[in-house]
Image (cartoon, rainbow, N blue to C red):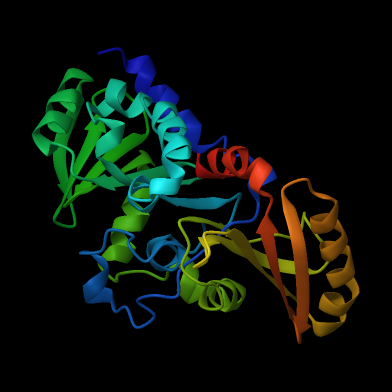
Amino acid sequence: MNKSYLVFVFSLLAGVLVVAVLSGCSDQNSGITPSDRVGGNFAGGIKDISKVAPANLTEGVISYTNLKQIREDAGMQKEYAMLVEGLRVFNLTFSVNPEDIDSYVRGIGWGAITGSFDIEGVRNALNNLEFSQGEYRGVEFWTPQSNDKGAVAVVGNMLIFGEKDVIMGIIDNMKGAKSSLYDDSESVRAVVDDLPDGFIMRLVPTAGLYYEGVEAIGASVVKDNAGTLKLIGVFRFNSSTYAEKVGPEIETNFQKSPYYSDVSVVQSGDMVKVVAEIDAGNATEFVVRMGY
C-alpha cells in the first residue's frame, strides 16, 4: 500500500471548502459528562464533536456528514452514490469500504470516520503503511515509524486520524482531562445549542472573516416532513448592535445565492438565525459539495 495515499487523506483535512461555511449541528446529548465522552461516536453531530475537540482548534471549519442517514433515505440515493465515490480514498488507505462508513468528520489537521468496517483490516493496512501500534490514555494509538507527525486512533467503531498532537488532544477530552472547544467558547456553545440535528453540519468556531462582529457560525441541513431540504444557520455576534447591523447583509447574501429560496432571517439579541429552503434543481450539487 502506497504511503502517498495516507498523505492524501491527511491533506484532505486541511482543504475543507470554506464556500460551505454553513451547515449544521445537533442538539442531542446536551448533558454529556466526561465519563460519557470516551464511548461516543459523534452520533450527536457537531455538539458531540465540539465537546471533544481541543479548545485551541478554532481555525477553519469543522464538518460532519451523516452518511447513514443519507444512505437510508430513498430520495437521496444519487447524492449518496456521489458522496461514496469521493470517499474511496479510505479504501486505499485504511482498507475501509466507503459503503461501510456511517459518518465522516473533518477539520483542520484531523478527521474521523465511524461505521461497521473491519478493524482488523484497518490494523493490517496500518501495518503495511509501517505504522506502529501503541496506546495513549488506554486508547489504541498508531504512529508512523518515520518522523511523520501523523497518528491514527481506534476508538470502538471510530477512527480518528490526522496530526498527532491534535489526536492526543481529542483523546484527552474524551477522557475528560482537558477543556474542550465547547467548554471554552461561549459563542460555540450558543451556536451549537441553538441548532437542530441535521444530516450535514458545519461549525466555524471563529468566524470574524465572514461578517463583521460575528464570533461563531453553525448550520444544519435538514429534511422536513414534506421532503423539502432546508438549511438552518445560526450566527453569534459580539453584540446585539452588530447582529442588527449585519443581519440584513446575511439575508441579502442568502437571497442572491442560487441554492436558496424562501429565506427568512430573525435577529434576537446577539444572535441571527436563518432558515432557507434549498432549491430542488440545485439540491444534489448542494448536498455533494457540503457532504465532503
Q: Name the residue nearer the viewer: 290 or 211.
A: 290
Q: Residue furthest bottom?
A: 269
Residue 216, x across and y down, in percent: 66, 66
- Residue at horizontal 84 percent and vertical 71 percent from the top: 247
Q: Residue furthest top?
A: 2
Residue 267, x across and y down, in percent: 78, 81
Residue 31, quarter of picture: bottom left
- Residue at horizontal 38 percent and vertical 51 percent from the top: 73
210 vs 146: above or below: below
Q: Is residue 153 left or right of residue 235?
A: left
- Residue at horizontal 51 percent and vertical 73 percent from the top: 184
251 vs 156: above or below: below
**Quadrant holding the N terminus:** top left
Residue 188, x across and y down, in percent: 57, 71
State whether residue 119 appears in this view: yes
Q: In this view, does 270 lie to the left or right of 37?
A: right
Q: Name the residue nearer the viewer: 152 or 277.
A: 277
Residue 22, quarter of picture: bottom right
State whether residue 204 appears in this view: no
199 vs 122: above or below: below
Q: Is residue 244 left or right of residue 105?
A: right
- Residue at horizontal 21 percent and vertical 75 percent from the top: 35
Q: Residue furthest left?
A: 120
Residue 41, x across and y down, in percent: 27, 58
Q: In this view, does 44 lie to the left or right of 275?
A: left
